[in-house]
Image (spheres, helix red, strand yellow):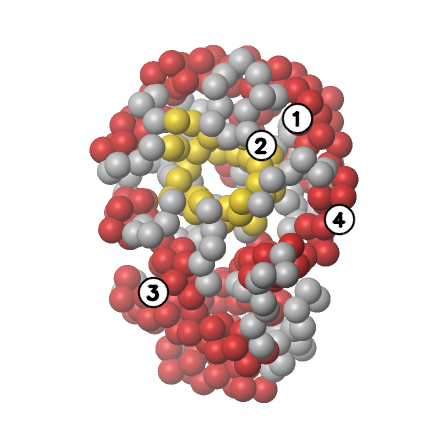
Amino acid sequence: MKYYLAPMEGLTTYNFRTNWNRCYGGMDKYFTPFISNRHMNSRERNDVLPEHNVGMYTVPQILTNKAEEFLSLAEQLAGYGYHEVNLNLGCPSGTVVARNRGAGFLGTPRELENFLDEIFEKCPLEISIKTRIGMDYMDEWAPLLKIYQKFPIKELIIHPRLQKEGYKGTPHLEAFAEAVEALQCPLCYNGDITSPESLTQILTKLPSIDTVMIGRGILQNPGLLQELKAASTESVALPSCEERLAVLKEFHTSLLTGYQEIMSGDTNTLYKMKDLWTFLSHSFESPDKYVKKIRKATDASDYKLAVNALFRECALQSENS
């Protein structure tokens, strides 16, 4: 099984990826949050600089519905030494979809096909695609598959939900099965992998899957990949609870220090860290009162006190829970 880290806007930045890779590691590919500006701003450029992605197979992701913008960015990324770029056709955000980008582009299949024609003809890099299965209705998927059949896609990453479903409800595994039958390109499954049990349930229904992408599951439990690998082979041993907590503390400290070095002032740094705790709190049992104190922190000193109290007094969730 190959494992990829999903791109999550504002969360899986190079600071997150670098520190997660150092503390945990083991991902086969790391995808950057999307770039949407032909003239990359400093944040986007910093995220893809080779020196900020050492030791990782990193794939920049582009969000656009204009071929000239995609190709301009691809040329710049080729100059940084990248060999692959990913097209975002999966973001379900209303503000993105309203501009016919991300999953919104799936609602205009003729324009999408023309766009793909141009970028696959002219792009200097290999192109993978991250996609939803349509906007509003399941019957949108079959025509989209016919479009994807026409192009030499390096890899198609499928989140088998409609745009309107966001991240709610059960993924439509039958839609992924249709892609297995229809397409020759490599496929990657994305969606709701949060434990070894959840992956087992998916593989029971889709045994051909050999590549998965994980986003929220890693943010909720940074050690999830080790649990998945331990469940799939007897040669990988799970760390003890004390070891898990020690690594999590190290990861959190490194992440905080990294943001303090990158960002100006406590406000911006704490905004980033508090956003992460929306997910990371799932690693602990009964964390609510501690997370409230974390959210109320107004400076780094108060924040550290609140986090230390959580680490000291809150038990980690047991493996596979």
Q: Label 3, secondary structure: give it.
A: helix
3D distance between C-alphas at marks 4 and 2 = 18 Å
Disc 2/disc 1 C-alpha distance (Å): 8 Å
The amino acid type found where label 2 is placed reads Leu
Is 193 placed above or below 173 here? below
Question: Residue placed at 40% from the left, 55% from the top?
Answer: 17
Q: Are marks 2 and 1 in contact (CB under 8 Å)?
A: yes
Q: Quadrant of the N terminus?
A: top right
Q: Which residue is mark 2?
A: 187
Which residue is denoted by mark 1 in the rendering?
179
Decide if residue 96 is on the left or right side of residue 314.
left
Q: Is residue 73 above or below residue 166?
A: above
Residue 109 shows up from this direction? no
Query: Which structural element holds mark 2?
Result: strand
- Tell me what residue is drawn at x 72 percent, y 45 percent: 202
Q: Mark 1: which amino acid?
A: Ala
> Which one is in front in this view, the residue at disc 3 or the one at disc 1?
1
Quadrant including the C terminus: bottom right
Q: Which mark is residue 201?
A: 4
